[in-house]
Image (cartoon, rainbow, N blue to C red):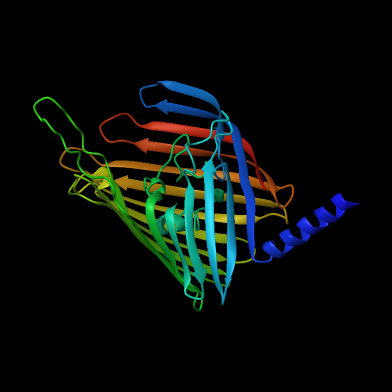
């Protein structure tokens, strides 16, 4: 009897605490199995059957929570780690998110490792579920370069505004804490300059009714490199009821921190709900690397088609294919096909 009373007292105390704060364990488990085949103009052909983690969403687990400080002010935190389901190997530490911050009527501010403002809009206007089967994405073979531009940045300060009339925005800046190494005796000791990078990023988002649009910009400044890499992304989608049309345009300047190396890219796509649980999505994407003093023009194009079926609110099965052609200038063209089926579960 005494143990029961003690247990009830503990539960009551916990309930009072939970009214003020909360912690949630969450995660995504996503994996696909498929075939990747590459053919070159010279006749060489390779085929690989693979299992890959994160077909639609990156496989992760994490903890997030908040505390009500009163007056509309909250303290918030999040820790998130990536997990490779094909090998069972987890990433080092909380490699994707590790931050603490405050939120209220002014918006929200985060300090730590977070997505940049540019990273936050990636995928919003991408078709084929922004999955590995989308021709723009790089799994197996991909058309775009700016899909790798969005970052989970360390030492990041990230501000997210409230929404006003459908508009919201965000700005982020990551501190570069890495500097050139100090060498006591240059004649006998060699030291490399750490590749520190700071990211300056912003986005502007509109979402109201059937129309959504996004604009994002990010500048990557690398220690010891005078040419900053800059990315611009414009996306839009419109829900017509029977289908949602999507468009994305991107531009990348000083690709790989090389002066005057430029890439432009675009994508069109459509999502078609076939039933309450089944959706068909397809897209076409193309990108062009401009010629420089040392390189020739290179073009990549491709298309993808996929189906996703929701078994429940938390579990989805999907499958489809994409075909990508890389016309890499002086070298032989490379054609790559990817066929895959997968399952995604959230908790």
- The x, y position of residue 211, in whole percent, is 53, 69
On the picture, is 247 further left or further right than 311? left
Choose between 74 and 59: the one closer to the eye. Answer: 74
Looking at the image, is 239 positioned above or below residue 178?
A: below
Residue 122 in the image: state x and y as whole percent.
46, 54
235 sits left or right of 59 in the view = left
Say if 289 sits above or below 75 in the image. above
Q: Compared to 326, does 76 lie above or below?
A: below
Asked if residue 72 shows in the view, the reply is: yes
Q: Work out which residue is located at the far right of the displayed protein and give it.
A: 1
- In this view, the residue farthest toward the left is 187
Residue 131 visible in the snapshot:
no
Task: Point out residue 104 in the picture as x, y percentages from the top left corner.
Answer: 52, 72
Total marks placed: 0
Depth order, front residue of 218/44:
218
> Closer to the camera, 302 or 126?
126
Residue at the spot 10% in from the left edge and 30% down from the top edge: 186
Q: Is residue 151 left or right of residue 328?
A: right
Q: Quadrant of residue 336?
A: top left
Quarter holding residue 131? top right
Front residue (pair 131, 199)? 199
Residue at (74, 50) in percent of width and height: 312
Identified at 19% across, 32% down, the residue is: 191
On screen, residue 202 versus residue 281, left or right, reads left
Q: Pinpoint residue 288: horizontal percent, then vertical percent.
A: 32, 46
Occupied quadrant, residue 218:
bottom left
């Amino acid at each position: 009897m005494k143990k029961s009373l003690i247990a009830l007292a503990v539960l009551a105390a916990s309930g009072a605490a939970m009214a003020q704060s909360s912690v949630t364990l969450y995660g995504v488990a996503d994996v696909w199995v498929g075939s990747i085949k590459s053919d070159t103009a010279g006749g060489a052909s390779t085929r690989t059957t693979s299992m890959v983690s994160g077909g639609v969403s990156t496989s992760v687990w994490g903890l997030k929570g908040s505390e009500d400080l009163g007056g509309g002010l909250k303290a918030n935190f999040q820790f998130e780690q990536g997990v490779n389901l094909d090998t069972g190997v987890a990433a080092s530490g909380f490699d994707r998110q590790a931050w603490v911050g405050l939120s209220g009527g002014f918006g929200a501010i985060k300090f730590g490792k977070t997505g940049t403002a540019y990273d936050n809009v990636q995928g919003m206007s991408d078709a084929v579920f922004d999955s590995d089967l989308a021709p723009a994405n790089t799994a197996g073979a991909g058309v775009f370069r700016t899909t790798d531009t969005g970052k989970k940045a360390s030492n990041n300060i990230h501000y997210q505004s409230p929404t006003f009339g459908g508009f919201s925005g965000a700005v982020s800046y990551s501190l570069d804490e890495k500097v050139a190494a100090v060498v006591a005796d240059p004649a006998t000791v060699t030291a490399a300059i750490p590749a520190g990078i700071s990211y300056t990023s912003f986005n502007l988002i509109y979402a109201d009714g059937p129309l959504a649009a996004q604009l994002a910009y990010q500048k990557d400044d690398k220690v010891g490199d005078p040419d900053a890499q800059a990315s611009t992304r414009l996306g839009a989608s419109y829900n017509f009821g029977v289908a949602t049309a999507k468009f994305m345009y991107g531009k990348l300047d000083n690709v790989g921190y090389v002066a005057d190396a430029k890439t432009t890219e675009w994508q069109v796509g459509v999502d078609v709900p076939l039933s309450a649980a089944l959706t068909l999505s397809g897209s076409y994407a193309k990108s062009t690397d401009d010629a420089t003093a040392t390189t020739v023009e290179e073009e990549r194009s491709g298309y993808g088609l996929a189906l996703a079926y929701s078994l429940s609110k938390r579990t989805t099965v999907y499958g489809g294919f994409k075909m990508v052609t890389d016309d890499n200038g002086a070298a032989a063209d490379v054609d790559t096909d990817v066929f895959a089926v997968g399952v995604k579960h959230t908790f």
